[in-house]
Image (cartoon, helix red, strand yellow):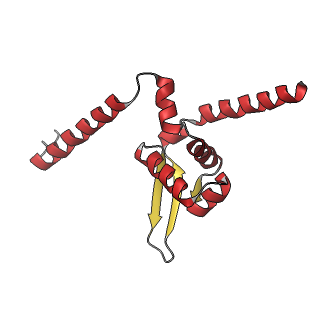
Amino acid sequence: MEKPLDNSEATTTAAATKATAAALAALPACPVETTLTLIGNKWQTLILRDLLMNDKLRFKELQRSVGGVSQKVLTSNLRAMEASGLVHREAFAEVPPRVEYSLTDLGRSLKPVIDAMWAWGESYKAALAGK
């Protein structure tokens, strides 16, 4: 038999359910628009690509891998992707501090989308070369 929730657990569960419902209500009705909301900018797509190709990356490794992105913009995009559940941030209590980024299962579920973008880009370049 399950233990009944105490008042603080019930309040926390209710708050989490309410926050999830609010987040869901804020998403666009169109699934394509929802996807674009989560990975629709250049930097988020490139972060996703690089984390799919590498299991874990430290901040500077990711910055070099993405290329041309400022520290501020990378930080902002990583925070947004973490908040949406696509990226996991793990901080280690070391000197100097070490932080690693990886994709969550939800983030890894976007692999077919990135693969399709990769294939389309290759086809587009081949079509231009054939003209």
In the drawing, does residue 79 fall left or right of residue 44? left
Against 121, residue 9 (above or below) is below
In the drawing, does residue 9 fall left or right of residue 77? left
Image quadrant where residue 112 sits = top right
- Name the quarter where the N terminus is drawn: top left
Image quadrant where residue 30 sits = top left
Image quadrant where residue 85 sits = top left
The number of numbered badges drawn on the structure is 0
Residue at screen point 58% across, 58% down: 70
From the top left corner, tell me how far across and down residue 35 is, in percent. 50, 31
Residue positioned most to the left? 7
In the drawing, does residue 12 fall left or right of residue 61? left
From the top left corner, tell me how far across and down residue 32 is, in percent. 51, 25
- Name the quarter where the C terminus is drawn: top right
Residue positioned most to the right? 130
Q: Nearer the viewer, residue 71 or 47?
A: 71
Residue at screen point 15% across, 44% down: 11
From the top left corner, tell me how far across and down residue 74 is, in percent. 54, 54
Q: Nearer the viewer, residue 90 or 23?
A: 23
Residue at screen point 58% across, 55% down: 56
Residue positioned most to the bottom? 95
Q: Nearer the viewer, residue 14 or 64?
A: 64
From the top left corner, tell me how far across and down residue 67 is, in percent. 67, 54
